[in-house]
Image: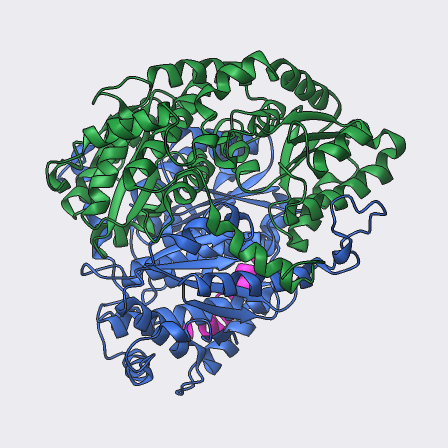
Chain colours: A blue, B green
Amino acid sequence: MVKVDLSGAKAFFTGNGPDYSAAEAAHKVLAERSGAGADFLGWPELPAKIRETELDRIVAAAEKIRSRSSVLVVIGIGGSYLGAKGAIEFLRPNPGPGDTRVLFAGNGVNPDYLYDIIGQLADRDFDVNVISKSGTTLEPAVSFRIFRDILSAKYGDEANDHIFATTDAKRGVLKSLADANGWESFVVPDDVGGRYSVFSAVGLLPMAVAGIDVRKVIDCAVKEFKALDERSESNPAWQYAAARQNLYASGKKVELLACFDPKFRWMAEWWKQLYGESEGKDKIGIFPASVEFTADLHSMGQYIQDGERILMETVVRFDECMTFMEVPFVSSNADGLNYLAGRDLGEIGRVIEDAVMEAHISGGVPCMTVSVKKRNEEGLASLVCFFELACGISGYMSGVNPFNQPGVEAYKKNMFRMLGKPGAV
Amino acid sequence: MVKVDLSGAKAFFTGNGPDYSAAEAAHKVLAERSGAGADFLGWPELPAKIRETELDRIVAAAEKIRSRSSVLVVIGIGGSYLGAKGAIEFLRPNPGPGDTRVLFAGNGVNPDYLYDIIGQLADRDFDVNVISKSGTTLEPAVSFRIFRDILSAKYGDEANDHIFATTDAKRGVLKSLADANGWESFVVPDDVGGRYSVFSAVGLLPMAVAGIDVRKVIDCAVKEFKALDERSESNPAWQYAAARQNLYASGKKVELLACFDPKFRWMAEWWKQLYGESEGKDKIGIFPASVEFTADLHSMGQYIQDGERILMETVVRFDECMTFMEVPFVSSNADGLNYLAGRDLGEIGRVIEDAVMEAHISGGVPCMTVSVKKRNEEGLASLVCFFELACGISGYMSGVNPFNQPGVEAYKKNMFRMLGKPGAV
């Protein structure tokens, strides 16, 4: 389980501080499925359920793909993209020589981007995992047409064997296509929204192809959700949800998610969708942004330290790095760094984390930390389960339905009309 | 030159709208070097100056590196990192088989990240470009120690021939080391701050190694800065600076820089440093954030459409894509997309851009556009010169010194004390 530390935010709390009774009430509504959006509350049970149903088949399909293809093209957008992308960049960002690379298409219609992916395929063997609840979302559907053409040209009648569809269990265009063409298919659950779907086949198949031990991730996630069901002020999800709502009420309108490990960059993108899409509605919501330290201390650091005081900061920390590396000793000591010689970079990094938070707090930015032991499968499961639950609680505390996204339709409506889709108005 | 379109922001302007007389006054202060930070106003002349001084030597060094090494490790942070990273990801993100890859180290001390870069070097030939005005900034200095060790182990006495230093012209630790060891060195100009240095050797050497035609970039930039010196309301830098200050005054505290081309992602990071570090001080400043469309319409789209109304949006547009790609025709039309068959993805993308802006404007988000013809060398020069000048004007309009960054010192001071640096307090 993650550990949340609110000591760096304490001086900024208003009123009676974080409202744990409101967090408790929100947790109750969530657990009893008695609030708005209750039809999309399948995610706390998802890890246990997937282990009983599709996990073996996901792992087998991934092994098949890994054994024969050097690339997997994943076609999905939003929740059908960011979870897997985040997890892969977090745990397996640099494929080794024998690994299958996972490339993401379908998250846009930019032809230069697609051209690059096609160029990276070259004459390599590849598979396609198309992910869409309906099969009619424009961006992935357009990409899928293009990659189906490439598969057909390359593999002829065998092309169907190279397509894996993750879609609705029973209905929809993609499900029909999968059945008609014999594509192996996996389920996008009915009771889980896209941004909560990373522990379904949506996220797990690409993750497994990239070489992540998804059984371990799921085993950990099952335990995590169980532990997070605790109803007390020591529940880190309550702490985080209640603290950020208190800070938001006092005018901290932007939450910066900061991490000192560059491999967290795409997990932060996943987090931005989770929180932005869940809470940003009805003209309210904390605006989610992210920074990568220490790099961004030399770009956004000035603003954070001394710009408009609308920021709160949440630092994701790891107790240990995966690698041990020492600062070398240099006899001339021209750069004056010998006081660090022989010290582990990971340890130096943790000192810097403390130094940065101390600076930001003194500059007027409340800092919370969310820490896990390591950047490994267990750490991934802990972070995902924690952020998912805290998001639901925080959303209910703010009074919105955290599980819908009505605002996403506005551009689609305009788009279909302007593109001349038959029947669009 | 870029074209700025403010029509999507018009309904949101307050008072008498954008204050062009204030923009004119700010431009005058900037051109006459009569305001705060005037010692750092060398950047408008930088392209012309570099062409006369170091450009030939930069190109020659890049050719040498390209001809012998498959990797260039660039060691720098902040302004010594984001310009080159942005430009390379914008123009040459996918090195071909014969190209030299540019990897960035030195922008942090995370050992897992450095370990990965070292792993990518494997037994390949490589060069190092270390970029630091002083040579004592902690993160790049630590990395440089590590990569010097690797170079020495690999090349012995020849290691010095593989190091290129971009540093102060006359003084500092790195300059002394370069002189003592015979490293070829290039200049970090005295009168240009890090975030404005992309058209010095800081940005140009890595860009040239990546295969970017830096002579073309610089030729275009010389013309751009000349054209942008126009003193009238048709100057796009006045338009953008005055519009965003008007919107900020009315409560739009966050500016989202949006682009529909994923290759702009790192240019947006460069832009965030430029604006965040220039304007975020004295407890004021627009908070800079970025989104990549259409991908992020399925993550941040909900918030943008319907969250707290503190956003303004600036969309970077390209009149043309570099690639032509058609939507394939599928006889079954199961996905219902045949109404798009035969149409160019670039054209479809531009329709979507219009659809998205219409949706966001109707949701209460003022939208500005900044457009250039293409994502090529000329487009890069146009965008960089425009954003640099507009930033200086906008900063002066808001009353701050846009060319300092006093807030960056706070974490460093804590860090040196907590790490036990001799003499630190």
Image quadrant for the C terminus of chain B?
bottom right
The spot of residue A94 in percent (x, y) is 63, 47
Vertical comparison of B362 with B193: above or below: below
The spot of residue B170 in percent (x, y) is 67, 28
Residue B332 visible in this rendered orientation of the protein = no
Q: Residue furthest front?
A: B34
Rendered residue at 60%/15% (across/down): B53
Image quadrant for the N terminus of chain B?
top left
To which quarter of the image does residue B366 belong? Answer: top left
- By secondary structure, the bulk of the magenta-drawn segment is best described as helix
Vertical comparison of A264 with A394: above or below: above
Magenta segment, which residues? A44-61
Does B318 sit left or right of B107 as displayed? left
For the residue pair B61 and A146, the one nearer the viewer reads as B61
Vertical comparison of A327 with B276: above or below: below
To which quarter of the image does residue A375 belong? Answer: bottom right
For the residue pair B250 and B208, the one nearer the viewer reads as B250
Vertical comparison of B126 with A266: above or below: above
The stretch drawn in magenta includes residue B187: no
Rendered residue at 54%/32% (across/down): B84
Rendered residue at 66%/16% (across/down): B57
The spot of residue A151 in percent (x, y) is 49, 35
For the residue pair B149 and A261, the one nearer the viewer reads as B149
Q: Residue furthest right?
A: B157
Does B177 sit left or right of A33 as displayed? right
The stretch drawn in magenta includes residue A54: yes
Does A38 sit left or right of A384 as displayed? left
